Image: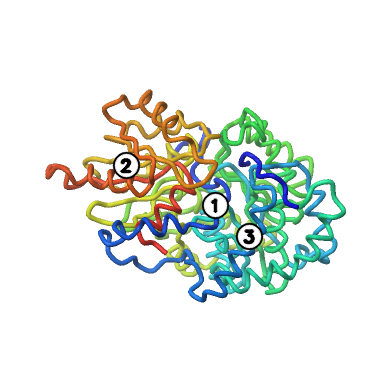
Amino acid sequence: MSEPRPSDRYDDSDPDETFAGIVDEETQRDPDLAVIEAGSRTLRTRSGPPPGDAVPARPADPEVDKALRAVEQELAGRWGETKLEPSVTRIAALMDVLGEPQRAYPSIHITGTNGKTSTARMIEALLGAFDLRTGRYTSPHVQSITERISLDGVPIAPERFVEAYQEIKPYVEMVDNSQPYRLSFFEVLTGMAYAAFADAPVDVAVVEVGMGGSWDATNVIDGSVAVVTPISLDHTDRLGSTPAEIAAEKAGVVKQGATVILAQQPVDAAQVMLKKAVEVDATVAREGMEFGVVSREVAVGGQLLTLRGLGGEYEEVFLPLYGAHQAHNAAVALAAVEAFFGIGAEQPGSLDIDTVRQAFASVISPGRLEVVRSSPTVVLDAAHNPAGARATAEGLSEAFGFSRLIGVVGTSGDKDVKGLLEAFEPIFAEVVVTQNSTARAMDVDALAAVAVEVFGDERVQVEPRLDDALEAAITLAEEEDEYAGAGVLVTGSVITVGEARLLLGRR
């Protein structure tokens, strides 16, 4: 018998200043998006055929799709990602009965508030370019649950996802029967990922925490490299109300003798991390000190960077992502891979520059300032907290010359919605508030009330259905000839962005 569904769980600055965090995590998505699929035909026709996409669609084989949906349904019957019992007891028990698969390969462990998934993708690309077989575990997913577990940069096939679940299911049930609480949705997925990586086998795993650090389900690995992306306020009801309190929880991923790659942080958060490193005899490399962004300039389709790594400078690195925050993520990723190879510590020198350039040029990060349509341009970004929204606003203003920008915003109810809207207020001419299809979505009328408070009544339009909200925003962007350079930004939640991708034909 499954548990009742709980309420859902869950810059470009100087080195000495607080680095505004960016976008990443959100929550698990409803696996069945049939309603969204059915309502997308008009928008899809208007936007034309979608280009190639790394986000997997539903399986074409009806039997495989049926099997995947069955697994999704079983996982959905467990505690969701917002329901927590803070310990690693159950996941440790699962690893024990599985034979400790997470010990079969070295790991790079990533925590922080914002930027984790983009940084993980960059680390994965770099490692792969140096001929290492990689496993990447990230959350949440944008459209397909299979995105969370990747091998060699590609989400595992639906058939393999189903097999991975069936292989560990008897052991999951064994642990369920021995613990006060059953394994959660996220814990089971974590077990699947670690087992799949061992089975592949991979040369290195790149693992993003779900939330926090110390008691996060991923924290049964011994990451030789611990990466801490910018810390800001999010999940304050579970992690703490200040950057220092949140950092204390996230510092749990720093293991004895590890190397810590520390992105720019609020001073109090940095102090906590440095104290933890001293306690466990870890080596620390700090952005702005041991590594960082030397220069960056906007380029067609992204930006051109000069990065300073642990082993020297890397010039003319093209990154096909927008925003200063992504440049900082690139510096962090580069330092993490250098540390993994022992550069800057055990050995002198730097990574091969041509291989580094090739790797960064291949990076994609769906739902992060991602252009999904033109005429008018529609951009998706999964910013869901104020720090992420500020970075998105800055990146959008820098990379796109919109004469008029319309926002489509659908958020979760447990976020700092007013802070997020205030970050976007200077760049939105008008905002269309809406809600996504999940129970976590903030009620559209409640969201509208906050939006009116921030934008004023005349700049707010309410459309409860996301497809209608997209239509309305596109119409607003197109309505006057003088606004030929108008655009639309869809934001507020990974879930909203994922559903918008489907509606606009991105598969």
Distance between the alpha carbons at the discs numbered 2 and 3: 31 Å
Secondary structure under tag 2 reads helix
Tag 1: Cα neighbours inside 10 Å, few (<14), some, or many (≥20)? many
Disc nearer the start of the sequence (1/3)? 1
In the image: residue 474, left or right of residue 183: left
Residue 34 horizontal/vertical position (percent): 46, 59
Q: Could you tell which of marks 1 and 2 lies nearer the N-terminus?
A: 1
Q: Where residue 435 sits in the image (x, y, percent)?
A: 43, 41
Is residue 64 shown above or below 461? below
Pointer 2 residue:
397
Residue nearer the viewer, 183 or 332: 183
Residue type at mark 2: give it.
Ser
Nearest the eye: 256 or 399? 399
The answer to whether residue 408 is visible is yes
Cα distance, mark 1 to mark 2?
A: 29 Å
Q: Amino acid at mark 1?
A: Arg
> Which of the two marks, 1 or 3, is nearer to us in this view?
1
Question: Percent x, y for residue 442?
Answer: 49, 36
Q: Residue at x 69, y 66 (%)?
A: 165
Where disc 3 sits, the SS reads strand
* Disc assigned to residue 29: 1
Sequence-wise first label, 2 or 3: 3
Name which residue lies at 80% across and 59% down: 94
Q: Quadrant of residue 11?
A: top left
Give the residue pinned by disc 3: 206
At horizontal 65% and vertical 60% (from top left) the residue drawn is: 340
